[in-house]
Image: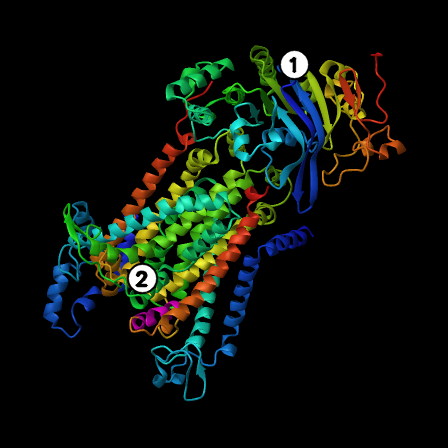
Amino acid sequence: MIAATSLAAFWRDFRRNRIAVAALGVVLAVLVLAVAAPLFAFQDPYDIAKLNLLDARRPPGHVSANGEIYHLGTDAQGRDIWSAILYGLRISLEIGLISGTIALVTGSTLGVAAAYLGGRVRTVVMRTVDLQLSFPPILLALVISAALGQGKWQLILALVIAQYAYFARTAHGTASAERSKDYVEAAASTPISPRGIVFRHILPNCFPPLIVVATVQVASAISLEATLSFLGLGLPPTEPSLGTLISNGFQYMLSGRYWISIYPGVALLILIVAINLVGDQIRDQLNPRLKR
Amino acid sequence: MLVMSAIVFIGVYAVGNPIDVLISPEADQKIRAEVIALYGLDQPLWHQYSTFLGRLVQGDFGTSFVFGVPVMDVIMTRVPATLELVVISLGTATLLGVPLGMYAGYNPDSAVARAIMGFSILGFSVPTFWIGVLLIYTFSVHLGVLPAGGRGETAYFLGAEWSFLTADGWRHLLLPALNISFFTLSIMIRLARAGTRELMLTDTIKMARAMGLSEMTILRHHVLKLISIPIVTVFGLELATTVAFAVVTETIFSWPGIGKLIIDSIALLDRPLIVAYLILVSFLFIMVNLTVDILYTLLDPRLRRSETGA
Amino acid sequence: MTHPVLSVSDLATHFFTDAGIARAVDGVSLTLDRGEVLGLVGESGSGKSVTGFSLLGLVDPPGRIVRGSIRLNGTELTDLSHGALRKLRGLRIAMIFQDPMMTLNPVLTIARQMTLALYAHGKVSKSAARDRCIEVLETVGIPAARDRIDDYPHQFSGGMRQRVAIAMALLHKPDVIVADEATTALDVSIQAQILTEIRRLVQETGTSFIWVSHDIATVSMVADRIAVMYGGRIVEEGPSRALLRDPRHPYTRGLLDALPSQAEPGSDLAQIDGVAPSLVNLPKGCVFAPRCPRRDGMCDAEPDLTTASRRAWRCHHPLEPRDPT
């Protein structure tokens, strides 16, 4: 199958960049950790009953009454930072992937539809998209989040609204370019329905740039979510994401209790950088203009 | 713009009843009624909106719920602070980022280039707020050399207070400006690098070399001019993004600009202020986009109205 | 005739790729006299363009010149450092590329691009530079050069753009100009104009040209001598008229027979069987043997160069001469 061999070729080139491979490994590791968080964490940071206030703000390495070691210390509510990070990663990934996927699907559909239908539909849709693209996503997400209030699904909605435009523009761009190519005209002269043309011919050619945008946007979504949580919008404090943890720990930093803010920050950093490294490599490989 | 203001107005109104924030709910009913009447909150929504528009045309954004003074005054006192931050960070980011990126694109496999790119990935991935936290931790807590917040001394110039005119002001400016600039710096580096790398493989550069131009000349005249088109686009976008991210940075560093103002206003449901901020910011973005479009035609002669050739 | 302007001896340029070593140019020798136009003909993959680039030192990695000598008016180019080579490029040896839309910078005026080329080789005053550019543009037949010099490339038609490219090559009055598929992207009628222009320039200025092309028909219109390349080496060489009328190498014969003008109307076009060899995996012995209708056991050994009067060829079984020379 052509798809299989090109995938194999893609992987072979990808393997050459050791940093990207390492990054991919990190992403997979984080995924595993996040999905299996309950296995790796020895404490459920959301279960308030389990938290021991006497253990609050303990430095890394402190031993609790139960004999468990708080490897990364505890926060103001007595949560073990390590466990909180794991659950926080889980939330970050969940939100990033869900909002990314929804934005991908809605944005691409919109973009491809606009490109294929043309005319008025296209003008209206693309003008709206362009208008939205001139606003930085952080501001959009901020305002929408503030309006909708705290909560996971409100946050996802805010992120989707902030991000779908990127997918729409990329999809529209590729679809337009493909549409005017000769093979589409050839296909149109056959009995394949317009929907068939879109799905079997145009869409597959749109995948490469969309994948690149997707990786960037997932990383961006995670970053945005953390920023919003940090500012107090976004997720409620009972379900702390990495952003909330950093925010909570901020005030303690000046008195030297750095671990409450820094370690969640490091975890966030590793996740986002890893995703971006992988995305970078994918983008470089899919860029035809860099091939000698 | 009209659409924008309508959306904002309705949105903010839907968030919560500002009255409950202004007056404690246990207050006397009579006082409540007075305040409601004063701010016109008893009128139907559409009426409030049209009054708002009417005043808007005259430049009157209404009075802040929280501060009790005209909104424009409040905003205007805070604008210089944010302006300093935005200009300094954008300026440094571009002036530093483009040459660094060009170098990285010219020698993509060198150790220096890899270091630059590694740095840019960090600057671009790490959320701004966390860089801020880190900066404060390193320089204020750990090393103790720079202040952790506030604006420091200011000097009066052309009707406003500026902190870049004082030495102490610079000490306070450094960290927040650095904080915001990281993101744009990284983007500029990556953009310049990508553009340069692609261009070096083109026939245009080959021909320039065939004519005996030095590499420096090629970079300065051919490459720079060609990559300036995407850079200008990004600059426009980054201006908007920087103004937006100023919200985060100003919160962390307690920098008294309009960013911090909006966060506080959202928390306090100061509707006129929120509305005014969003409208002003939308206006700014639209202006920036227009300017970028104009700059495009200046930079890319193919976009100008063509005079026919022979 | 005094000693040649350009003398290339056993030039080899190889590309060191992951898939193997591509021997794009593998033992090419040629000479060029003052005021002579040498046509370099071959299919894609024959190494003709790489030969041109090698002469200018514009071979990009992973390629490099691995052996051979290039003497330009007495200067040995392969000995020169990058900096020294750059100083000669554009000054004593220049190049014209195939598609001026790709090689001219779209965001700079013609004036800017030309003056940059002038400044690269010495201090000139702004007005003197501008005057020189206008002079050269007029030489190549651009009307109203004084006004048009401030235009951008997209404001010129295809033929005019190529004239501008030619003008740029002539700025410093180089000894040799390499033209790589210079007319391939143009309409046939414009092609004819440009070729006439080139011949006139050669007459007037005494510049020598190496005209690289896959199209033997256009080459025949402009070249004094023709060298045919295949698989990285020259398989036949000689004065144009003689070579075209009376080729010795079967490949040359094949190229000529394949020309549409040679075919009887209504008949199939003649083709050369097979495809051009991969430069990584060149056949042992005679490189053309796999496709040659005249091959036999002898062809497993690489043929030596046979020279006769002013012609040369590499073949164990050359074609019979039409008229005995």
**CA gap, disc 2 and disc 1:** 88 Å
Mark number displayed over residue C2:
1
Residue C106 against residue B239 in the figure, above or below: above
| Range of magenta residues | A242-253
Seen from the viewer's position, the closer of residues B46 and B162 is B162
Question: Which percent across, then down, holds residue B234?
Answer: 39, 45
Tell which subunit mark 1 falls on. Answer: C
Q: Please, what is the dominant secondary structure of the magenta stretch?
A: helix
Amino acid on which the number 2 mark rests in the picture: Ala
Seen from the viewer's position, the closer of residues C186 and B164 is B164
- Near mark 2 (Cα within 10 A), the count class, few <14, some 14-19 or many ≥20, is many
Q: Residue at x 54, y 35 (%)?
A: C82
| Residue A50 seen from this side | yes
Observer-side mark, 2 or 1, equals: 1
| Residue A233 seen from this side | no
Tell which subunit mark 2 falls on. Answer: A
- Near mark 1 (Cα within 10 A), the count class, few <14, some 14-19 or many ≥20, is few
Residue position for label 2: A147
Question: Residue A249 colored magenta?
Answer: yes
Question: Which percent across, then down, holds residue B284?
Answer: 28, 46
The answer to which quarter of the image holds residue C311 is top right
- Quadrant holding the N terminus of chain C: top right
Question: Residue B237 colored magenta?
Answer: no
- In the rendered view, does B155 fall on the left or right side of C243? left
Residue B8 against residue C93 in the figure, above or below: below
Q: How many marks?
A: 2
Helix, strand or loop at label 1? It is: loop
